[in-house]
Amino acid sequence: MSREQKYQRYGEKVRIFNGLGPEEVEHILHHGKVMNFPEGKTIFHEGMLGSNLFIVLKGEVGIFHKHELIARCKVGDAFGEMSVLNHEPRTATAAATTEARCFTLDEKELNEILERRIANKLLLNIIHVISERLEKANAYNAKLQRAVKKAGIKVDAD
């Protein structure tokens, strides 16, 4: 497999790299680093300040809120980006649910990338991923509210 094909493949598998050319993917990948996590290893904790976003390259990472599994990140999925973008503490804990390999970019590296032309494509992909998550959360919330209303349970909205 040629170098160009290798980076083209990453661009196809990693959602936040969609639409980027092989040279743009290569540029991003050379700014970050790869980390390996054994099964059960915590990557970051809920409430921590975060300055890294992660992309699963191998294995699976669970996202936990108050010790409850709320999402599974598989190969090509990004996580941790919200804390980097909004400078707020992590809203969940991330832990390897299998042996996992992740690519990570810290805020400084991400800012260097965002100064280049590829910034618009990368940011639009990140926004798309976050929007999808919000749509799923809204649909789940609506379903939950219907079930609560049907059961006749009063819930304080605050």
Image (tube, rainbow, N blue to C red):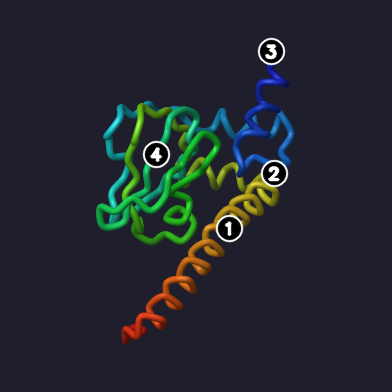
Side of 129 relative to 87 (left or right):
right
Q: Is residue 142 above or below residue 158?
A: above
User: Marks 2 and 4: CB-CB under 8 Å?
Assistant: no
User: Marks 3 and 1: CB-CB under 8 Å?
Assistant: no
Image coordinates of residue 9 in percent, x first then y, are 67, 27
User: Residue 155, can we see it?
Assistant: no
Choose the circle earlier in sequence order: 1 or 4.
4
Side of 118 relative to 93 (left or right):
right
Q: Nearer the viewer, mark 3 or mark 1?
A: 1
Residue wearing tag 3: 1
Choose the circle earlier in sequence order: 3 or 1.
3
User: Marks 2 and 1: CB-CB under 8 Å?
Assistant: no
- Between residues 80 and 51, which one lies in front from this camera angle? 80
Image coordinates of residue 92 in percent, x first then y, are 34, 54
Residue wearing tag 1: 132
Residue wearing tag 2: 118
Choose the circle earlier in sequence order: 3 or 4.
3
Q: Secondary structure at mark 3?
A: loop
- Write the residue at 52% across / 58% down: 133
Quarter residue 155 falls in: bottom left
Choose the circle earlier in sequence order: 2 or 4.
4
Q: Amino acid at mark 2?
A: Ile
Q: Amino acid at mark 3?
A: Met
Image coordinates of residue 109 in percent, x first then y, are 51, 40
